Image (spheres, rainbow, N blue to C red):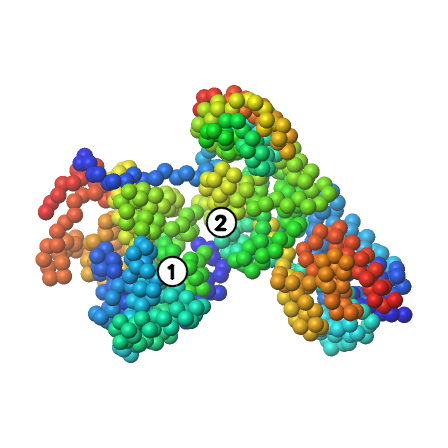
Amino acid sequence: MKHVVVIGGGIAGMQSALSLKKRGFDVTVVEKSNRLGGKLLNWHCLFPSFTPATEVTDTLKQRIADSGVEVRLNAEVVEFDRHHVVLADGERIECDAVVLCSGFTLFDARIKEEYGYGIYDNVYTSVDIEAMLNKGRVELKNGGRPRRIAFLHCVGSRDEKVCQRHCSKVCCVTGVKQAIEMKQLFPEADVFNFYMDIRMFGPGYEEMYREAQQKYNIHFVRGRISEAAPTIDGRLQLKAEDTLTGRPLKISVDMLVLLVGMRSNDDNARFAEHSGLQCAPSGFMAPADMFLSNVASGVGGIFYAGAVTAPKSVGEVLNDGAAVAEAVTGYLG
Amino acid sequence: MAAIDWGFSINRPRTIDIDNNNLRKSDEILREMPELQCCIGCGACTASCTAGNLTEFNFRKVHTLVRRGEYQGAYEEMNKCMLCGKCRLLCPRGINTRGVVMLIKRKLGDF
Amino acid sequence: MKRATWSEYQKDIADDKYYYARSCIRQNFFPGSEKAFLDILSKDLGKDIFDDPAHSSCTGIGYHSDIVPLETIMTVVARQFAMMTESGYENFVTSCITSFGIYTEILATWEEFPETEERTRENLYKTTGREFRKPKCLAHTSDIIFHFREDIARLAKRRLVNSGTEEPLKVVEHIGCHYAKLFPKSGIGGSEFPYVLAGMVDAWGGECVDYPERRHCCGFGFRNYLVQANRGYSVANSQKKLESMAPYHPDFIVANCPGCTMFLDKWQYTIAEMDGRTYGGNGHGIPVLTYEEMAGLVLGYDPWELGMQMHQVDVEPLLDKMGVDYDPAAKYLGRNGKFIGKPSAAVVNGCSQDFIYDIKL
């Protein structure tokens, strides 16, 4: 039986493994952390349906457990080619094909020093908000309820200054989703979204955006915040331009949420060099082409699924998992 | 007091100061017509505006300023609207633009 | 004030042997500061610093006012480096933030576009017959004081504390835009949380306040304030900062840029005369110090030796808080004991508007 190694145990890796197993391959998932599920484990619920993220992760984990896919946890890959995957402890796993599902890295919001993340109280990232929602406790540092909340889009996306020119795609929708969640938790609060463009690319997203405006009275200001500074009463003063009126705008808020982008993994370049793969200018892995071979790598026997090639939504990542099984079948016969 | 001719005066800030603007009227307007919050700033209204093509009147800008609590001059601006209704035909978000004109005039008549 | 990243923005600062370039305007507005810098370096710290009478203006003010072209200023800068090279120094220290920005930018331009350096070398040789080496270390004088802040703390005669209450003095530090906004890596602490002045304040017992408009420009802007009719929005920027810092009741402001120090001091006078508004305690302005004056006070220098009588906003309230022993009668006596004239009363120094312009000279 042909053996396929899937690198990464997030949702892309799990779905790829399941689809490959269904097609009769012997499959091993190698995951560097001590559990399956990847970054989605920290997520509270998914746009636009507010489906709990655990519905996706738990279901996939259960299917993996039932499927007979071999799972290797705490196994970090240092290099690979189509026939070998080498782990950090020196072990070499023989295989016939490799599917790279190593996903993305979250942008570190501290790099955008002007927003004071990690310095001022009550500056959070979208990831922090999901964690707080999971714990069931969203509150200010002093335990109080926020009266005014601002979301800032495109933190670490579409920004040359931090070498991230690409759009991270999912943050716009996440910002609208979290704004609604904040408004549900704190109906008395004013919620502002500061955006450069609102990109509602999927089914139901535009409808959710409209609902956020009309039903939840969430304010949208087209303008990028230039800096956050502390006020004397411990709040945050934000500066932006209200570009639709052409005037500078100043506002103080209790809570600032930075919608952090997805950037490429640092080890993509190393993998690419070792295995003859191509990286896009964004640092994400470049598929063989954008249409007919978008889960192939350009090197026979090495395939991609999920956000290792570009920022993607959960639904798109899961589709990649099915598509990659089709492509591997075509290669191994 | 001796007068000095400074040759200049200190500029007033033109920043929209959300903290110090009185948002009460803006809230009332949005409560009566929540759909106004749906504006995505496309400018179709202003592009077609009978008055806006010949005067400084900019419907999109005026109602956005009103929503930020900047009421100064909004009533006078809205008086330039000829109520022809073309903008309402065009609005991709289905906002009752003529209704917005009338509502702002009614709420901000004092400003 | 909270900060996290200042230690990530560091630069190499030479320990000794500096070639000193003065500022054009500081000698008029804060005439004791450059002298104090030279004294602190050579007398208190025992360093070798060369104050070269042969160096010139960097022509930065002309450059930023669209009068001096880029090629010209590059050649002038090259001449400064030639003077340094000829005097046998490698570490260039400039007293002015505009100059610091100019030098940093030109060195970066030469790095990125080597042909511009070649052309500049040719121009300099053709016009003056001189050649130059680029400095091994380029620093602003505030970098140097920052570098020796712990040594100064050890030699301190006074600290930045209220001598009555022992509370740390509240200090607003203002950094000139061209110190780190052009190249964040060229400044200690970067552009968002610069530490060059805050480090001195911390080392000498004071406490910096972080206020909403801390990072905002003072409004100097060269061509803008140089034209009288444009000054309105230039002043308005200083006013925006003053209004933002006033609720924190700062004991003084310290700045590292000639323009900012002058603006924040002098515009308080203008605003007080025009609008009757002051931002410090008891209807007075907030004293504005250069970092050399701050260091000088810490080292026990006499405030009038430091030239602090030349400030628009009186510094006596601060001196009293620090417990500095000074002779009020000597304030307007120059270095040789000669009366240098006394400014008229001003609203910013707590005088009623009815009494101003009572010229005593």
Q: Chain of mark 2?
A: A
Q: Quadrant of residue A185?
A: top right
Q: Chain of mark 1?
A: C
Q: Residue at x 21, y 38 (%)?
A: B5
Left or right of C43, for residue A4: right
Examine the rendering and report whether any part of residue A312 can be seen.
yes
Q: Which mark is residue C302?
A: none
Same chain shared by disc 2 and disc 1: no
Front residue of B48 and B32: B48
Q: Residues within 10 Å of mark 1 (few under 14, many from 20)?
A: many
Q: Residue furthest bottom?
A: C88
Residue A12 image position (x, y, % from top left): 76, 58
Q: Quadrant of residue A272?
A: bottom right
Residue type at mark 2 is: Ser
Front residue of A23 and C122: C122
Q: Residue at x 79, y 69 (%)?
A: A301
Q: Quarter holding the N terminus of chain C?
A: bottom left
Residue type at mark 1 is: Tyr
Q: Residue at x 81, y 62 (%)?
A: A327
- Disc 2/disc 1 C-alpha distance (Å): 19 Å
> Disc 2 marks which residue?
A226
Q: Which mark is residue C179?
A: 1
Is C283 located above or below residue A37 in the figure? Answer: above
Residue B52 image position (x, y, % from top left): 50, 29
Front residue of C301 and C238: C238
Left or right of C237, for residue B65: right
Residue A56 image position (x, y, % from top left): 78, 51
